[in-house]
Structure formats: C-alpha cells, structure tokens
C-alpha cells in the first residue's frame, strides 16, 4: 500500500494548475480526494472527486473544507505574471495572507495530521549561486519580488508557529522552482513566461515578442516532477524544515524559446526582444541537495520532453479556449 491510499486529502485550489495535477496523481494513488476552490468547475472530471466550491478567504468555508480531512495541500493562491506583479503588486498580499491564515487555523482546529504549504523561490536574496534553504534572509529580497516574497516569508512564519504551539500540527513548507506543464494558465494577462511563449509560437506570431533581452536564467521544473516532490515531502517530512523542490538545472529565456520553436517546427521565426516590458530576477539557480538527501527526490523530466508534453496538451485541449 502506498502512503496516500485511502487517506482523506484536501487540495485547496484543486481547480488550478498545480492543484489539478496533484488531484490526478492522488486519485491514481487511491486517495480520497476533496477539492476546495472558488472556480465554477474543475479542469478534470472524475466522480471520485468530492468538489466543494467555496471562498477560502471566508472562515466558515475553510472550516467546511477541512472537516474529516487527514492531509491538506494548500495550493490555493492569488497568482499572476510579471506584468500584473509590476503594476499591482499588492494583489498578491491581502487575499493570500487571509487564505493562508484561515486555512492553517481551520486545519489545526479540525485535527488535520499534516499541512503542506508551497512557498516560493522568491524568498531568497539575489545570488549568483544555487540558493540553499538556509540562505533565506527576512526582508533581503529582489526588489520586484518585494511584495509577493514578503507575503511568502510571512506565511512561512505562520506555518512554523503551528509546529511550535502546544499540541502542534505538522506543517511542511516546500519552495518550488518555476513550474510548467499541462493545465497551466495560458491566458495573456496572467500567464507566466513558458505558457506565454508557447502560445506565441503555436499561434505563429510574427514577430514573436520576448519580454526583456532573453538572457534571464531560471530553474524550471516540469509539473509532474514537482507533484512527485510535493508528495514525497508530505509523506517524509515531519518537522518544520523548508525544502527546495527544483530541477537543479539552469536555462535562459532564449533557450526556452528556441526549444519551443524546434518542438513546434516553427522555422525562420522573427524574434523581437522588448526591454521596455517588465521582467523579473535576471538569475535564479536553486540547490536541490536537501531534497535528494531527505526525500530521495530528483527531477526526471528533461526540459525537451516537458515542453513537448506541454505543447501537445495545449494544442489538443486549450488552443481555442483562450483569447
């Protein structure tokens, strides 16, 4: 029997990108899955899903969501791309702090066995080297990440508090790399760099506009690998010990675009780099040694294979679903 078989698991935000992929894998593992989300419908249909449409900024809804639940994956969040983050940075603060606070409180009061919170690699300071878990410094943040990263850091503190009170709750914090894959957000206003570039290539934009000069270096992890890392963290971590879940590989935006062009066979595409558009941290590398040592986790999906699967999914499912 695997760890999650017959366990009662809540995916808060289970209609979103990470949540949908978690739901699919947990159903495959035989978990009893409940989804709590404010969206009208899920991205997948399965009669075994207990779907609760609710507003997780409302205490009563949080309390309903966690009733009779063993494990909580708190992947509900107010997220966006670089443009929204630059124009309205506070959009990431209030709703997320409220959701995280109320869900932790509700889970604790309901006797949840373990709670997993996905933080972010934005919590780390600027560094030219792969960042390690012990290198986070409160308030030492890349300026454009200031609002969202402080929110994540504060939420991590909230998580730790519940592990230190009388009759503590086990809380796991993971710090993921930038993820991509099927069920990602491809809407222009809110998408991140990979889905945005995929749309431009698949739709044969000419020219293809790239925000910035294309030299930014990131760590991207395929969603299937991220889900496996999160499941291992939930299973194996029993003390407050934030952990990076990443590929450990670096790639530039130019390399991403060139790979997408190759996969979709878009030849002779004209590329225009726009330095007037908002971009984020120019270099982010992530150390994965703790995940390997504590969880036995290593990302298995190559960047090429991950992009192939994502492009195939988008073309089959979503090409006509966005505007």
Image (cartoon, grey):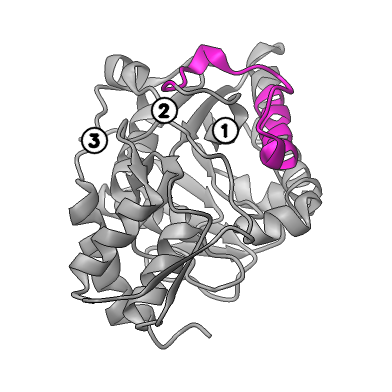
Per the rendering, the mark at residue 2 is: 3
**Residue at figure coordinates x 46%, y 17% from the top left:** 132
**Residue at figure coordinates x 19%, y 39% from the top left:** 300
Q: Quadrant of residue 150?
A: top right
Residue for badge 2? 286
Q: Is residue 259 visible?
A: yes
Residue span colored magenta: 129-158
Residue 22 falls left or right of residue 152: left
Foreground residue among 10 and 69: 10
Q: Is residue 56 visible?
A: no
Extreme residue in the bottom direction: 320
Foreground residue among 301 and 259: 259
Residue for badge 1? 112
Magenta: main secondary structure: helix
Q: Residue 40, percent across and down?
A: 59, 76
**Residue at figure coordinates x 67%, y 28% from the top left:** 141
Residue count near mark 2 (Cα–Cα under 10 Å), binned few <14, some 14–19, many ≥20:
many
Q: Say which label, 1 or 3, has the lower sequence index.
A: 3
- Asked if residue 127 is positioned above or below residue 14 in the image, the reply reads above
Q: Say which label, 1 or 2, has the lower sequence index.
A: 1
């Amino acid at each position: 029997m695997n760890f999650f078989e017959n366990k009662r698991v809540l995916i808060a935000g289970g209609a979103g990108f990470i949540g949908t992929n978690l739901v699919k894998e947990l159903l495959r593992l035989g978990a009893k899955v409940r989804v709590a989300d404010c969206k009208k419908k899920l991205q997948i249909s399965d009669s075994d899903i207990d779907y609760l449409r609710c507003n997780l900024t409302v205490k009563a809804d949080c309390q309903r969501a966690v009733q009779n639940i063993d494990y909580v994956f708190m992947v509900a969040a107010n997220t966006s791309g670089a443009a929204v983050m630059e124009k309205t940075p506070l959009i990431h603060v209030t709703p997320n702090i409220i959701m995280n606070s109320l869900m932790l409180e509700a889970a604790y009061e309901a006797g949840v066995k373990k709670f997993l919170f996905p933080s972010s690699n934005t919590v780390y300071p600027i560094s030219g080297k792969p960042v390690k878990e012990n290198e986070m410094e409160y308030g030492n943040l890349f300026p454009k990440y200031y609002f969202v990263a402080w929110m994540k850091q504060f939420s991590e503190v909230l998580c730790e508090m519940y592990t230190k009170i009388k009759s503590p709750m086990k809380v796991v914090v993971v710090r993921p790399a930038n993820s991509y894959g099927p069920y990602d957000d491809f809407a222009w206003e809110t998408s991140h760099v990979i889905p945005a570039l995929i749309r431009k290539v698949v739709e044969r934009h000419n020219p293809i506009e790239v925000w910035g000069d294309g030299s930014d270096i990131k760590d991207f992890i395929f969603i299937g690998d991220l889900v496996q890392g999160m499941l291992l963290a939930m299973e194996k971590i029993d003390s407050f010990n934030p952990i990076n879940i990443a590929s450990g590989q670096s790639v530039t935006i130019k390399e991403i675009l060139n790979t997408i062009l190759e996969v979709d066979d878009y030849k002779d595409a004209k590329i225009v780099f726009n330095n007037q558009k908002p971009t984020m941290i120019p270099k982010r590398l992530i150390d994965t040694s703790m995940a390997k040592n504590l969880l036995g986790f290593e990302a298995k999906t190559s960047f090429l294979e991950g992009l192939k699967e994502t492009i195939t999914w988008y073309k089959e499912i979503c090409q006509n679903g966005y505007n």
